[in-house]
């Protein structure tokens, strides 16, 4: 009987400890950390064409989707996603 009680207590305690150890917060990678950030356009970006932006001190290739959208040099844009090695930006 004592064995069953001790086994049950050990199971409950070890389960909660294992759950804490296995469910750690996801650390954003360098690429993920730019999503949601404001970037400055360094090369004009036109609809569905590539340009460049500077975010967190680094230059990235960037694109925008939609019709008749142009971001001129010096404009601030928001990074909304990463597609391959390019940032997807919007105003």
Image: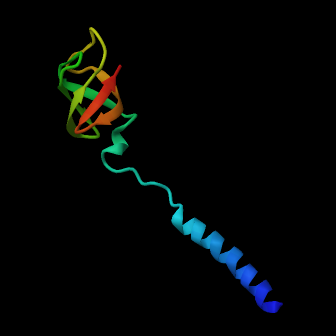
Quadrant containing the C terminus is top left
The residue that appears at 77% across and 90% down in the rendered structure is 3
Q: Does residue 22 appear to the left or right of 86 in the view shown? A: right
Residue 35 location, quadrant: top left
Task: Relative to 67, say whether 30 is above or below.
Answer: below
Nearer to the camera, 53 or 10:
10
Task: Relative to 70, say whether 54 is above or below.
Answer: below
Nearer to the camera, 42 or 32:
32
Colour scheme employed for the rendering of this structure: rainbow
The residue that appears at 18% across and 20% down in the rendered structure is 49
Nearer to the camera, 77 or 24:
24
Q: Does residue 48 appear to the left or right of 7 in the view shown? A: left
The residue that appears at 68% across and 77% down in the rendered structure is 11
Q: Does residue 87 appear to the left or right of 37 in the view shown? A: left
The residue that appears at 74% across and 80% down in the rendered structure is 9
Residue at the bottom extreme of this rendering: 2
Residue at the right extreme of this rendering: 1
Task: Relative to 58, say whether 90 is above or below.
Answer: above
Percent of width and height locating residue 50: 18, 25
Percent of width and height locating residue 78: 36, 27
Percent of width and height locating residue 66: 31, 15
Residue 81 location, quadrant: top left
């Amino acid at each position: 009987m004592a064995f069953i009680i001790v086994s049950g207590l050990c199971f409950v305690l070890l389960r909660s400890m294992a759950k804490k150890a296995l469910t750690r917060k996801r650390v954003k990678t360098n690429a993920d950390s730019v999503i949601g950030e404001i970037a400055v356009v360094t090369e004009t970006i036109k609809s569905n064409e590539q340009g460049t932006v500077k975010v967190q001190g680094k230059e990235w290739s960037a694109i925008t989707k939609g019709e008749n959208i142009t971001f001129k040099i010096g404009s601030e844009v928001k990074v909304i996603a990463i597609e391959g090695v390019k940032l997807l930006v919007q105003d």
